[in-house]
Amino acid sequence: MSEAKNRIIVALDVPTADEALRHIDELRNEVGAFKIGLQLITAAGTPFIREVVEDGVKLFLDTKFHDIPTTVAKASMEVARLGVWMFNIHASGGFEMMAQTVDAVRKVCSRDNLTKPKIIGVTVLTSSDQETLRQIGIVREVKDQVRNLALLSEKAGLDGVVASPQEVSLIRESISNPEFMVVTPGIRPSFAAADDQKRTMSPKEATQNGANLIVIGRPILQADSPIEAVRAILSEMDK
């Protein structure tokens, strides 16, 4: 169970720091890490992030940076200074953006004696499907776009990618490096609704396909008992 527990990242998609802290206090011994995304980053800011990190919480900062290479690299250096465990950038920003970010973060961590955070690339959002890609002019099938961006992320030196659970097997077949991480949102246990996710899978299926980490938010946070929801997910994964 402990190995399965460490695979779970709880998405703190909530509007206030107080609500996030309540969930952290309740679940920090039940799961491996927590994710803070754009809503909470905007609402609570970097002082809250520092507070959480200094309390010993393993934090995935869901920044999804996508801009010119210099801008993303400089912003990523500041993320590294926050002490988070992991953060992400959009792989669709291209090779130069990713490679420059990796280099900048490595240098600042070496110079300032910081622990280097994991940097992962967002491939295709789990709320997107073939029609979504078509609307923005991408003619590749979703799976081919994910594979291309995963390979580009590895080439640029990223530690892994974010991808839907439906593409995990494809990434594992395409990338031989066993240390390359695949982080999967769009996870829906048997008791949960799909909500706005279009490419979903159960926790057990995702990990069996090769996902290192699974991100789960609403099925846990909106449950009558978040702890019992986590334990039900662990039970599903253990069967």
Image (cartoon, rainbow, N blue to C red):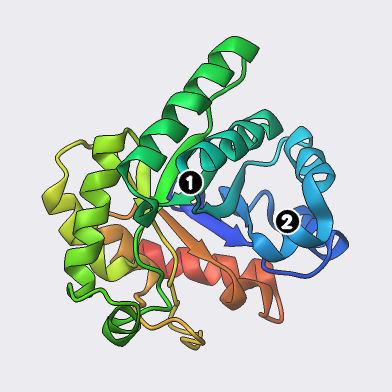
Q: Which residue is mark 1?
A: 68
Question: Up-down: is 162 above or below 115?
Answer: below
Q: Is residue 47 left or right of residue 235?
A: right
Residue 159 visible here = no
- What is the secondary structure assignment of the residue under circle 2? helix
Q: Residue at x 61, y 72 (%)?
A: 220
Q: Residue furthest right?
A: 18
Question: Up-down: is 28 above or below 138?
Answer: above
Q: Amino acid at mark 2?
A: Ile
**Image quadrant in which you'd find residue 168:** bottom left
> In the rendered structure, which disc, 2 or 1, sits on the residue that comes first in sequence?
2
Image mark for residue 41 = 2
- What is the secondary structure assignment of the residue under circle 1? loop
* In this rendering, the label closer to the viewer, 2 or 1: 1
Q: Is residue 125 left or right of residue 226?
A: left
Q: Residues within 10 Å of mark 2 (few under 14, many from 20)?
A: many
Position in image of residue 239 (x %, y %) = 34, 67
Q: Residue at x 16, y 66 (%)?
A: 144
Question: Up-down: is 39 above or below 69?
Answer: below
